[in-house]
Each structure stands twice: as structure tokens, then as C-alpha cells.
């Protein structure tokens, strides 16, 4: 998709993991002071949405208790909301954490389980009335990278997301509050699944819901670049993925490197806007 002056800009969601074990920034912002400073930094860099997570969902990650997750994310959400009106997403599979986060000021529930983790997930999402991100994941974080299999990764992801969107609406979640996330890196082979999924993003966008794309610093970038590339050295690949998403029409990209991504999207949009119209 080529952007026009009427096209809405792709929004940038900045990640703050208040965890010791997230794959990229684990341990960097696991105390309240450093997390608040990071939130201020991302806001200054032009972020549109902050995504706050208190439980790592990296491959092989162990679950954490509800109380611990609450202790990690709620003080940060309250602190951010006390000084900014920035939209805040809570990255959690746990309905009680989502409820507490919305009460503290969050406006979006980003659920990697697509509201399947708990029996009351769908009902809580409907009751909260916030925006909800439904993500595709084959398996669960602890085992998702153990021999994932697809016959048609794009078709299967699209079918899953359609079914989850229908389930959410049947439970009372308003259609206009539903986002979809194809789940790059979640239960997908490094290149055999992630690359066709990225190449077929237009089919996910065509489902008619805003799409959130997360490719930032993910391992498939390292796999393409020869392997053993540390997470904080995958900026080029992260931006390439974000621009592929923007060209496909995604509504937002979830990133660690906000300033650089904001700049890349501005330049991409400006170049497209300067293209001479066909005659």
C-alpha cells in the first residue's frame, strides 16, 4: 500500500517490559524509577502508545504469579497516567491484571493468548470496554517454538484471528475495539513461517480490523543475518520489518527503538507523498 495524504499514519507502540527476563530489555526497567524514565524517554521520542508488560512471553518463558504481575505493572501505569494522557496498553494474558490496569489508566488490553488464557477472558474484555489486541500464537510461551507446523501459515493465522474476533464480538466486545496481531515469532519457525507471514500481511489487513505488528529485535532477524546477532543489534532488520508492515497497511508497529522507527516511518511517508501522480 502506498500512503496518501489521507492515509492515517502508522502508529508506533513502544515496549516497556517491567521484567527481569524479557528477551530484549529484560532487567533494564524492572524497577519503577527506571521504567518511569523510559516511559518519559519514549514519549519524548514520539511514541503513540506505551505497551507495559509484567510477564515475559519470550520462547521458553515461565509464567509468573498474578500478584507479582500486578506489582510490576500497576504502579508504572498509575505513574505514567499521573503525568501523561498517552494511550497505555497492558501486555497480559490474565483478566485480573487487565482489569486492574484499566482501572489504573490503561486503554488497551494486549493479549498474546487472544483471550483464551482464562475462562472469563472474553467476558472481562467485554465488561472493560477497552481496545483489545488478539494475537495468534501456536502453543504457549513455554513450548511454542517446539516444532511449530503449518500447511498454510498465512491462511491458518487469518482463520484463527477471524474466529477469535468473532468470539470476542459474540461475547460483547465492540468490533471497533478489536485489533489483530499475526504473532510473528510466536509459535513460528524462524524463517519458514515468519517470512511468508510477513510477505502475506496484506491478507491479515484485509480482514478489516486494525493490525498491530511486532517484529522488533526478534530472532528471525538474527537468523537471516547469519545467526548470533544480539537483540540490541537488530535495529536494521526491525526497521525493515516495520516498513514492510507499513506498506501492507498495518495500523501500528510494536517496537523497542522508538526514535529510529518514528524517523523511518516519516521518511517512508514523505517519499511516497512526493511520488508524481500517474498521468
Image: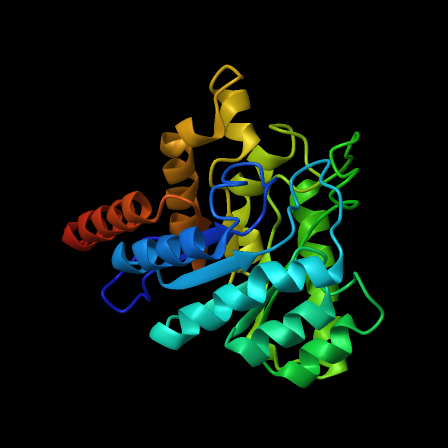
x%, y% of residue 22? 58, 41
x%, y% of residue 10? 36, 59
Residue name at image x 72 percent, y 64 percent: 94
Residue name at image x 73 percent, y 51 percent: 64
Image position of 76 with respect to 56: above or below: below
Residue name at image x 51 percent, y 24 percent: 222
Between residues 142 and 25, which one lies in front from this camera angle? 25
Q: How many marks?
A: 0
Between residues 67 and 147, which one lies in front from this camera angle? 67
Give the colouring mode of the picture. rainbow
Between residues 189 and 28, which one lies in front from this camera angle? 28
In screen coordinates, is 100 left or right of 43? right
x%, y% of residue 83? 34, 73
x%, y% of residue 56? 64, 46
Q: Is residue 249 visible?
A: no
The quarter in which the C terminus is drawn is bottom left
In screen coordinates, is 14 left or right of 185? left
Task: Return the residue found at the far top.
Answer: 226
In screen coordinates, is 147 left or right of 247? right
Q: Is residue 190 visible?
A: yes
Image position of 212 with respect to 98: above or below: above
Image position of 88 with respect to 276: above or below: below
Residue name at image x 29 percent, y 51 percent: 262
Amino acid at each position: 500500500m502506498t500512503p496518501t495524504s489521507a492515509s492515517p499514519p502508522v502508529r508506533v507502540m513502544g515496549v516497556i517490559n517491567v521484567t527481569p527476563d524479557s528477551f530484549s530489555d529484560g532487567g533494564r526497567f524492572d524497577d519503577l524509577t527506571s521504567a518511569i524514565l523510559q516511559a518519559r524517554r519514549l514519549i519524548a521520542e514520539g511514541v503513540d502508545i506505551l505497551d507495559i508488560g509484567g510477564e515475559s512471553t519470550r520462547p521458553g518463558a515461565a509464567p509468573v504469579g498474578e500478584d507479582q504481575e500486578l506489582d510490576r505493572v500497576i504502579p508504572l501505569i498509575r505513574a505514567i497516567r499521573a503525568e501523561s494522557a498517552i494511550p497505555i496498553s497492558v501486555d497480559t494474558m490474565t483478566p485480573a491484571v487487565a482489569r486492574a490496569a484499566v482501572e489504573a489508566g490503561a486503554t488497551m488490553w494486549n493479549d498474546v493468548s487472544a483471550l483464551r488464557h482464562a475462562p472469563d477472558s472474553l467476558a472481562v474484555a467485554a465488561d472493560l470496554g477497552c481496545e483489545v489486541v488478539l494475537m495468534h500464537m501456536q502453543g504457549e510461551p513455554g513450548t511454542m517454538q517446539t516444532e511449530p507446523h503449518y500447511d498454510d501459515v498465512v491462511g491458518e493465522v487469518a482463520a484463527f484471528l477471524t474466529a477469535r474476533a468473532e468470539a470476542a464480538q459474540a461475547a460483547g466486545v465492540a468490533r471497533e475495539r478489536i485489533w489483530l496481531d499475526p504473532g510473528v515469532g510466536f509459535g513460528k519457525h524462524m524463517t519458514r513461517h515468519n517470512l511468508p507471514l510477513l510477505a502475506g500481511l496484506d491478507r491479515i489487513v484485509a480482514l478489516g480490523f486494525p493490525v498491530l505488528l511486532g517484529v522488533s529485535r526478534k530472532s528471525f532477524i538474527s537468523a537471516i543475518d547469519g545467526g548470533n546477532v544480539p537483540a540490541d543489534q537488530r535495529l536494521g532488520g526491525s526497521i525493515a520489518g516495520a516498513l514492510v508492515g507499513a506498506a501492507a497497511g498495518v495500523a501500528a508497529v510494536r517496537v523497542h527503538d522508538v526514535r529510529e522507527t518514528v524517523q523511518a516511518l516519516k521518511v517512508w511517508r514523505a517519499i511516497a507523498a512526493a511520488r508524481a501522480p500517474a498521468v
